[in-house]
Every structure is written in structure tokens, then in C-alpha cells.
Image (cartoon, coloured by chain):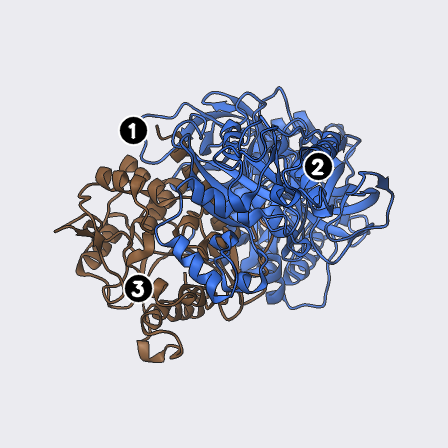
């Protein structure tokens, strides 16, 4: 894909500034003076102005909604198209009123470049500064300043220079350097399209010349690859990992590593529909799908990258954020942090500083209130794959979600790469019915019974599965054969009778968990068909048997607990596989051959199965 | 020449995939016009050939015969899960609305019935910002109240492609994957991709439909454009708004706005 703006492409500009400094008027005038207004619009504005007993009002061109016309302020961001001789534009009007900051952010975040409007008489007021700061946070780097209403100060050069100097100094502290500062009178069209004869001392560009000098935001193809997954599709026997490349390039044959899991696989194909030629490469900005040579555990939220230039993986990060909601952000509160498609539960560890918009000074604080910007430290229980915003903006920023709503935005300024905290436990609450729990959890409860020889990899697989599901927000718990023998089943030995009782108790316990909505992963050798059949009878149709298979020789070579050695030496009586039988399942729901599959592949297969049997897809019909 | 179309396409595919992943019960509204045809095409691209959710036509029985023929042919060829929702009669509409707006409001009520009966949480609609001033104010993921109303004054923040995908029980979201496209983009894309088009868009006897609606409230405009290339050439120079042939938009200053805040597409 070529850069999107090469020929017909439009440039997206946002016009920001303090309320009443004349943004809507500037836009109305731009549309008119570039000949971009549809027929009849000027007459319509005449009529609307006349009806309200006002002189001709350019701002009405934009303010198409009834509510706005009555209040005289722009409520929401609106997008309007116009053309210069050079190219088409879309202007995003962003309201200056404090109340509507979320609308300003919504508009400005889509822009390639910004025009900051400042009233010549009033100078850069609080909202002008706040908007300038947000442009910096939102990553809008190309800015031009227009000093409006110059007619009100009689096109005074000294007044213009004072306002110009003040805003340039402020922007410089944010590392924003305006391409131009232009004296205009939007109402009369001075220096919009045509050069004004009222300011002969000004020799810089007109507004349209400044706009035409902006460059479209480049899609970052020369930066490290970041390919965050949106979804995994199985339209037929293909397993397609779908997403959009946020930076860099990807080719068939590339070995991808996925963060935060660390799984790796090679790209076999880039899938498309209605393409005459096979696709061999893709780059930043493209929505694609790939197939891999291995079935690894990879899902929405994981980021694919190359071996070189990996993102950071952390449980703790420092962000600069803006806050959009009336409920303040406070230390200790927990939010969902969403970075590209990955979601993490994060807790506010500290508020390092709230930044004063007026003079950019910092003050430590206990809370961040609406419209404030601050530096905050967030801690997550799941590992976060992230870049620093200064290095890779698109994967170095995210939103904070509280309940149903986006409540703030943030960019990563610091990551802590200390050792990952480990939490393999989860809590179960008992005050809801099973059915309610299914629907609240977004998955079914059930029993996933992992059977196999000692050393076949049951515990490893069980713990990895628990981790992966827990990070997705599932209610999941491992009942491990060894662990239950320390408590629930302390006192039971390894005779056939005791083994049967051990399994019965685990099956009954697992059933209780499943009733409460939890997915229980029971990891037990459970060597006898009859014992497992009883466990199935207890669990009912929510019981799923998984045969974790590996031949005896493999298990004995692995011997993670040194038990085979002891059994061979005769130190353990009735050891399964050596001195006691293992009856392999005849028709398990799933067989995982850990002798043939790498651990991440084995986990991938198991997760696919869990998704189908217990996941969202099992709750609804007719999906891909 | 069409690099900008690749960008538009990629963005729409991203939105479609977000909707499909995040919203449990999803449907796509197919007006059988040029925009929703392009939207269906994009769905096939996003999901590798198959549209994985129901495609709904809100039918007032007032479409032109060519529209119904096109619907039945394409639904079969593309193996669509087509749902035809019959809209309630005009007598049941809000009688304070001007008469033509009232006719258009039938679709709003049809949509409400669809949502209620199908328990849909998300409805994809092929509207664009450049079509009409109130549509310019839309979000890509636009939440509706329990009654289906649109609160233009209190819309969610939407930036960096993070969309509102969590809702109160019983409410739904409108998803607008074509919001950032223009009329010209749609035609250029339809040409490049060879997307099937209802023939009514092409001029016959000096008239063509520029925006396709029901026969009682939509009128052809003067045009000699008989091919997509000629339509593209016409759009580059025209100053006539796209929806000029849509009677209900122009019946009174706020008629379309009233329709939309009550839940019209």
C-alpha cells in the first residue's frame, strides 16, 4: 500500500481554540472562500441569521443542529469537506467549551494537523493552552496558529507579535513548533484565501497556504513491526489471525514472536479475499490476516513482532494521561487499560503529578479531576506488552475504561521491567445462581479433566491454561492431583481403593466449582477407566476428558519430580506405568500429544478446544 | 491512484472486525443502495468471503422494482443470511411529523421492531459523515438509549480507534464503518472493486437516482451520467447536495434531525 494521501487523499485538519475565539466563523469562511459550499447554503445561512434577528453569521454554516443554533456554541465535533487547488480536506471542528473536552479529543485525535485559533484581543486563554497540551498528548505534531479578530485590534502589528510570542513560547515547552502564526480576520476573509491589504507588515503564508504546506501523517513503515491481533477466524480449515499492522512491515516467511506470551511461529501466508495474486508482504496501516506454520496460543490482544525490536513487557508503567469524566481518578482505583486490542485490569499505584495548564508546573496529588492532565503510575496483574509513546506512538498509548465508558486517555512515558508478579489464584463468590454466573462470566462452567502418565505434562499445561484464561477474565481454577493430597485428601494412600476415593472427592469438588460457574481444570493421573467413568457420571455433560498423552519412555526421560527413578529403584510401590497399570481413555473429548507438540502449540490446541466447548462461541450460534 | 482507497478500506475492515469481536448479537442494515453494497463488500473482505451475520432490509414495500430484483439476486449470489423486516404502516407514525418525514419514519419503527424481536445489540449502518450535517456528528460506535434515541449532546469519547463496546442491558449500538468515506470515495471504490450496483443510479432519459430511497419520497435528479466514470466526473464538479432528491430531508429545517434523534439511520 502506498501512503494513503498520495493523490486523491484528503488531509484531516482540526480547528481548536478557546470558546468564542471564532473557530466556526473561520470554517464557514474557509468553505465559502474556497468555493466549497453547496448551492443554496449561503442563502440558507442568510435566512437562518435573519430569522434570529442577527447579522449574517458564518458560523451557521457549521452549526447545522437546532440545539447549537439556539445556544450559539458548537456542541460536538463535526466533519466538513472542502478543497483547495492542491487537495481535498476534511475539517474537524472541535468545540472549545470546557464541558465538551471529550468531543474535542474525539475530533483532534483524528487529525493530521491542527489550526489553533486565538483571539487577538484576548490572547491564549486557558482553553487555548489546554487544547495545545492535548494536541501534544494526542500526537498531533503539525500545528499552525491563527490570531483571529485582527480587525478588532486594528491590525496592530505589535499586538499580533505579543500574542504570537506568548503562544510560541508555550508550545515550545511541549515540543510543539508551529509552522506559521497568521494574523486573520475570519469574518471578513483577511488572510484566509487571499492576502489581506490591512496587514502589509505580515509576509507569512495565508491560512490556505499554511494548510497546503502540511504533510499527511506518515504510516510508520520503517519502524519495528507491531501487529496486534483483533481476532482469530476459522472460516474453513485455515486458522487466520486477523488484525491491523500498526507499524513496520510483515512478509511471508517472517518468524513472528508474540508478546506477552513469547510464542513464536512463521508466517505461511497473508490471506485475502478477491485477490488475483497471492499476497507476500503487508505494511503499516493495512488490515490483514495471516496463517502460521504452527497452532500456537495466540489471541486478541497479543502483539506480533519480529525477534529484533520487541515491545516492553511489564506489570508497572508510568503514563501521562488526560481525564474526561466527573468521577475523579484516585490512588487505589482499578480501571481497564486498553492498548490497541489488549485489555488489562490496572490499579492506580500513585499520582506523580497533576500538571498546571497555565504554566506547566507539576504538583503531587491524591486525585485527577475532569479535564486535568497528570502523570500516573499504573500496576497490572497481567503482563502488558507496550511501547514508549515517544518511540512507537500507536502501540504506546491507550484508554482507561471505567464500567461502560472511556474515561481517559494516556501515553506511556516509562516502563518498569522488574520481575513479573505471579498470582495463580482466583476468588469465587457464592451469591449468584449458576445460570447468572454463566452469562456474567461470558463462558460456561465445567470440568476439564486432564488424565495421563506422570510427566506427560498435565500440570504444566493446566497451569499455563489457567494463566491464559485468567488473563482473559475467566473464572478458572486448577485442582491438581498432588495439591489436593495435601489437604482435601490427606490421609489417602495409593491403593486402588484410596485412588478411587481420591478421584471421587476431586470429581465432587470439581462439580461444585462448575456449578458456581468456574471452569475447573482437574489435573490427575487417574489411571483407571472405571474411576474416570465415575468422575464423568458425577460431572455430567459438563465433564470433558482430555488425554494428555506421551509415551512412557518420554515421560521417564522427563521425570520432572524424579519419581520414575525412585519407582525403578523400587522405592515407590504401585507407581503408574511402572508397577501399576495406566488405562488410556478410549474416547476422550480431546487428545493432546505432548511428545509431538511444543508447549505453546499444546496450549494453543487446548485453548481452541476450551473456546469451542466453554467459551463465547458455545453461548451463541451462527458465528464464524 | 487509489492508495487512499486502501486506507479507507483498511480502516473499515478494522471497524467491522472490532464490531464482530466485541458485540454479541450483530446485524447489518442493507438498504440495497451503493453505500451498503460497498459495506457488504467490505464485510466479505474482512471475514474472508462470508458475511457472518444477518443482513436486514427494512422494507416499506415502497422500493422500486429494480431494487427488489437486485436484492434477491445478490442475496443468493453472495449467500447472505437475508432478513426482510416489514415496517409498520404510516398511520402508526407520529402524526406531528411532516407527511413525507412520517413516511420515512416507518423505517425507524421497523428498526425498533427488529431490535426488539431479534434482541440485537449492534446494528451496522452504511451512513457517511459527508452525506448530511447531523450524520457528520456521529461516532463510529454510536450508543442508543433503551428507546433507541440518539443523544447528540452526550456522546462518548472516541479516539485512537478505541470504540464504545460496553453497554447497559437492553440498549444497542449503531456501528458506522463507512463514516469516514465520501460519496466520491464510494463510487471510486465501487469501480475499482467492480461491486454490483442497482441500475437506477445510472442516467436514463436525462435523470438518475443519486441517493436511492423509496419511490414515494425519493426523486431522480437531472443527470446524463450513464457509467460510473461519468458519475465520478459529475461529482467532482457538482454543487448539488447528495440528498437533494430526498424529500424528507428538506421538508422543514429540522425534519431530518428529528428523524435521526428518534432513531432513524
Name the secondary structure under disc 3: helix
Chain ID, blue in image: A
User: Could you tell me if residue A583 is visible in this image?
Assistant: no
The residue marked by circle 3 belongs to what chain?
A: B
Mark 2, residue position? A159
Can you name the residue that lies furthest to the left here? B205
Q: Position of residue A616 (x, y in %)?
A: 53, 53
Front residue of A475 and A273: A273
Which mark, by number, is residue B90? none
The quarter of the picture where residue A382 lies is top right
Q: Is residue B50 rendered to the left or right of residue A249?
A: left
Q: Is residue A166 rendered to the left or right of residue B155?
A: right
The quarter of the picture where residue B265 lies is bottom left
**Picture residue at 31% right of the left edge, 39% below the top:** B236
Q: Colour of chain B?
A: brown
Tally of numbered tags: 3
Mark 1, residue position? A276
The residue marked by circle 1 belongs to what chain?
A: A
- Of labels 3 and 2, the one closer to you: 2
Which mark, by number, is residue B247? 3
As measured in the structure, the alpha-carbon distance from the residue carrying label 3 to the one carrying label 1 is: 43 Å
Q: Position of residue A95 (x, y in %)?
A: 60, 51
Q: Is residue A141 rendered to the left or right of residue A25?
A: right
Q: Position of residue A9 (x, y in %)?
A: 42, 33
- Of labels 2 and 1, the one closer to you: 2
As measured in the structure, the alpha-carbon distance from the residue carrying label 2 to the one carrying label 1 is: 62 Å
Front residue of A250 and B191: B191
Front residue of A581 and A285: A285
Name the secondary structure under disc 2: helix
Front residue of B238 and A48: A48
Amino acid at each position: 500500500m502506498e501512503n494513503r494521501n498520495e493523490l486523491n487523499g484528503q488531509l484531516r485538519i482540526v480547528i481548536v481554540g478557546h470558546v468564542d475565539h471564532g473557530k466556526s466563523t473561520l470554517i464557514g469562511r474557509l468553505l465559502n472562500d474556497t468555493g466549497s459550499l453547496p448551492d443554496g447554503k449561503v442563502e440558507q445561512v442568510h435566512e437562518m441569521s435573519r430569522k434570529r434577528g442577527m447579522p449574517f453569521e458564518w458560523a451557521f454554516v457549521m452549526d447545522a443542529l437546532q440545539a447549537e443554533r439556539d445556544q450559539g456554541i458548537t456542541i460536538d465535533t463535526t466533519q466538513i469537506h472542502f478543497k483547495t487547488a492542491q487537495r481535498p480536506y476534511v475539517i474537524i471542528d472541535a468545540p472549545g467549551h470546557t464541558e465538551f473536552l471529550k468531543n474535542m479529543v474525539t475530533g483532534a485525535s483524528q487529525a493530521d494537523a491542527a489550526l489553533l485559533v486565538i483571539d487577538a484581543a484576548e490572547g491564549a486563554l486557558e482553553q487555548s493552552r489546554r487544547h495545545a497540551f492535548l494536541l501534544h498528548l494526542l500526537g498531533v505534531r503539525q500545528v499552525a496558529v491563527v490570531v483571529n479578530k485582527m480587525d478588532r485590534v486594528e491590525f496592530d502589528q505589535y499586538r499580533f507579535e505579543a500574542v504570537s510570542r506568548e503562544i510560541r513560547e508555550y508550545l515550545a515547552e511541549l515540543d510543539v513548533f508551529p509552522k506559521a502564526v497568521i494574523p486573520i480576520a475570519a469574518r471578513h476573509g483577511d488572510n484566509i484565501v487571499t492576502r489581506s491589504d490591512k496587514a502589509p507588515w505580515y509576509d507569512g503564508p495565508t491560512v490556505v497556504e499554511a494548510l497546503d504546506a502540511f504533510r499527511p501523517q506518515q504510516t510508520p513503515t520503517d519502524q519495528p513491526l507491531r501487529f496486534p491481533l483483533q481476532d482469530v477466524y476459522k472460516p474453513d480449515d485455515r486458522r487466520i489471525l486477523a488484525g491491523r499492522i500498526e507499524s513496520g512491515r510483515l512478509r511471508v516467511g517472517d518468524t513472528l514472536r508474540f508478546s506477552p506470551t513469547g510464542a513464536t511461529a512463521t508466517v505461511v501466508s497473508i490471506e485475502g479475499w478477491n485477490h488475483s495474486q497471492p499476497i507476500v508482504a503487508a505494511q503499516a496501516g493495512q488490515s490483514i490476516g495471516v496463517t502460521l506454520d504452527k497452532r500456537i496460543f495466540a489471541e486478541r490482544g497479543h502483539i506480533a513482532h519480529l525477534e529484533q525490536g520487541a515491545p516492553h513487557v511489564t506489570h508497572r508503567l508510568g503514563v501521562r494521561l488526560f481525564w474526561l469524566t466527573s468521577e475523579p481518578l484516585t490512588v487505589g482505583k482499578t480501571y481497564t487499560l486498553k492498548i490497541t486490542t489488549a485489555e488489562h485490569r490496572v490499579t492506580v499505584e500513585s499520582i506523580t503529578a497533576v500538571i498546571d495548564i497555565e504554566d506547566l508546573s507539576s504538583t503531587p496529588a491524591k486525585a485527577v479531576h475532569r479535564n486535568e492532565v497528570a502523570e500516573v503510575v499504573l500496576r497490572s496483574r497481567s503482563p502488558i506488552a507496550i511501547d514508549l509513546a515517544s518511540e512507537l506512538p500507536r502501540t504506546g498509548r491507550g484508554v482507561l475504561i471505567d464500567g461502560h465508558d472511556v474515561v481517559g486517555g494516556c501515553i506511556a512515558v516509562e516502563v518498569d521491567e522488574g520481575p513479573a508478579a505471579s498470582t495463580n489464584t482466583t476468588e469465587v463468590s457464592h451469591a449468584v445462581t449458576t445460570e447468572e454466573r454463566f452469562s456474567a462470566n461470558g463462558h460456561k462452567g465445567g470440568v476439564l479433566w486432564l488424565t495421563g502418565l506422570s510427566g506427560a505434562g498435565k500440570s504444566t499445561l493446566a497451569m499455563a491454561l489457567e494463566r491464559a484464561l485468567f488473563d482473559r477474565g475467566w473464572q478458572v481454577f486448577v485442582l491438581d492431583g498432588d495439591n489436593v493430597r495435601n489437604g482435601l485428601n490427606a490421609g489417602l494412600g495409593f491403593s486402588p481403593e484410596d485412588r478411587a476415593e481420591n478421584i471421587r472427592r476431586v470429581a465432587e469438588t470439581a462439580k461444585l466449582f462448575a456449578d458456581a460457574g468456574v471452569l475447573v481444570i482437574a489435573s490427575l493421573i487417574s489411571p483407571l477407566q472405571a474411576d474416570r467413568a465415575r468422575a464423568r457420571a458425577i460431572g455430567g455433560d459438563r465433564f470433558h476428558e482430555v488425554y494428555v498423552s506421551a509415551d512412557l519412555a518420554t515421560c521417564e526421560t522427563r521425570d520432572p519430580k524424579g519419581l520414575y527413578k525412585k519407582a525403578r529403584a523400587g522405592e515407590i510401590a504401585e507407581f503408574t506405568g511402572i508397577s501399576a497399570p495406566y488405562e488410556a481413555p478410549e474416547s476422550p473429548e480431546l487428545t493432546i500429544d505432548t511428545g509431538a507438540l511444543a508447549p505453546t502449540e499444546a496450549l494453543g490446541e487446548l485453548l481452541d478446544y476450551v473456546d469451542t466447548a466453554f467459551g463465547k462461541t458455545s453461548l451463541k450460534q451462527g458465528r464464524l | 491512484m487509489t492508495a487512499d482507497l486502501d486506507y479507507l478500506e483498511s480502516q473499515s475492515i478494522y471497524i467491522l472486525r472490532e464490531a464482530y469481536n466485541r458485540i454479541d448479537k450483530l446485524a447489518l442494515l442493507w438498504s440495497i443502495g451503493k453505500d451498503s453494497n460497498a459495506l457488504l463488500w467490505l464485510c466479505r473482505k474482512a471475514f474472508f468471503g462470508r458475511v457472518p451475520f444477518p443482513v436486514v432490509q427494512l422494507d416499506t414495500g415502497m422500493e422500486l422494482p429494480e431494487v427488489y430484483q437486485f436484492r434477491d439476486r445478490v442475496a443468493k449470489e453472495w449467500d447472505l443470511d437475508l432478513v426482510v423486516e416489514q415496517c409498520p404502516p404510516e398511520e402508526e407514525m407520529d402524526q406531528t411529523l411532516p407527511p413525507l418525514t412520517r413516511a420515512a419514519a416507518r423505517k425507524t419503527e421497523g428498526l425498533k421492531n427488529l431490535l426488539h424481536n431479534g434482541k440485537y445489540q449492534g446494528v451496522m449502518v452504511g451512513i457517511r459523515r459527508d452525506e448530511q450535517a447531523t450524520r457528520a456528528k456521529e461516532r463510529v460506535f454510536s450508543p442508543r438509549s433503551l428507546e433507541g434515541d440518539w443523544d447528540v449532546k452526550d456522546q462518548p469519547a472516541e479516539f485512537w480507534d478505541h470504540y464504545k463496546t460496553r453497554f447497559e442491558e437492553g440498549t444497542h449500538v449503531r456501528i458506522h464503518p463507512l463514516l469516514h468515506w465520501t460519496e466520491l470515495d464510494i463510487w471510486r471504490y465501487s469501480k475499482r472493486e467492480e461491486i454490483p450496483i442497482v441500475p437506477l443510479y445510472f442516467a436514463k432519459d436525462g435523470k438518475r437516482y443519486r441517493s436511492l430511497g423509496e419511490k414515494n419520497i425519493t426523486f431522480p435528479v437531472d443527470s446524463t451520467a450513464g457509467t460510473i466514470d461519468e458519475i465520478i466526473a459529475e461529482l467532482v464538479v457538482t454543487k448539488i447536495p447528495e440528498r437533494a432528491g430526498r424529500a424528507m430531508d428538506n421538508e422543514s429545517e429540522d425534519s431530518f434531525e428529528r428523524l435521526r434523534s428518534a432513531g432513524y439511520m
